[in-house]
Amino acid sequence: MKLIPFFLLLLLFLIPIDSIYAEQPPEFWIKSMEGKRFRSSKQNSPYVISFFFVHCVPCIKEIPLLHKFMSTNYPDVPLLFIDPIKEDSKNDIKNFSKQLNVPLSYFYKDSFGLISKKFFKGKMAFPTIVGIEGKRFIFRYNGIDEETISEIKTLL
């Protein structure tokens, strides 16, 4: 009886990581705050999405850090900061962009939450960072720190 938890834990480590992301990433399109359209179906290289909202304290820390990391190490990999919160206006996002000193071109408004609902089963968590390449997820994190950044470097 005492071995059951051990075997369950062992099974967890034996399951391939791909089975965690067995589902394919959803296809979507969205316009940036500056009007540039992003279509996931037309994207041949990896891209990174960060879901946020303007009053999210961890997001305030994560967005400039992720932007700096990506623009320094992976300037050709699209980075999308997507706000799915209905109450956040486009003006709120513009001010947020200025406050964080991150160009507005990286910000997207998912006004009806249609895109975010495709990525979250149930309750949304902020910040959530998702890496996608082709028809597969390459990573998914809630928040960012130096360890996460190191892992992203090995995955992109």
Image (tube, rainbow, N blue to C red):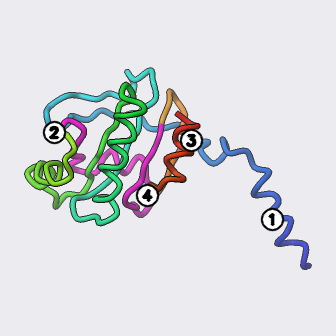
Specify which label sits upstream in the sequence, 1 or 2: 1
The residue type indicated by label 4 comes to Gly
The residue type indicated by label 1 comes to Leu
Q: Foreground mark, 1 or 4?
A: 4
Q: Position of residue 10 (x, y in %)?
A: 82, 60
Residue at the limit of the structure toward the left, as seen here: 91
Mark 4 falls on what kind of element? loop
Q: Foreground mark, 1 or 2?
A: 2
Q: Are marks 1 and 2 in contact (CB under 8 Å)?
A: no
Q: Foreground mark, 2 or 4?
A: 4
State whether residue 4 is above or below residue 50.
below
Specify which label sits upstream in the sequence, 3 or 2: 3
Disc 1 marks which residue?
8
Disc 2 marks which residue?
33
Quadrant housing residue 155? top right
Q: Is residue 5 left or right of residue 136?
A: right
The residue type indicated by label 2 comes to Met
Q: Foreground mark, 3 or 1?
A: 1
Q: Is residue 5 left or right of residue 59?
A: right
Specify which label sits upstream in the sequence, 1 or 4: 1
Estimate the spatial distance between the alpha carbons at disc 1 and disc 2, rounded to whole Å.
47 Å
Mark 2 falls on what kind of element? loop
Disc 3 marks which residue?
23
Q: Foreground mark, 3 or 2?
A: 2
Disc 4 marks which residue?
143
Q: Is residue 5 left or right of residue 91?
A: right
The residue type indicated by label 3 comes to Glu
Numbered tag placed on residue 99 in the rendering = none
The range drawn in magenta is 104-131
Q: Is residue 135 left or right of residue 13?
A: left
Q: Position of residue 14 (x, y in %)?
A: 80, 51
Residue at horizontal 48 percent and vertical 35 percent from the top? 132
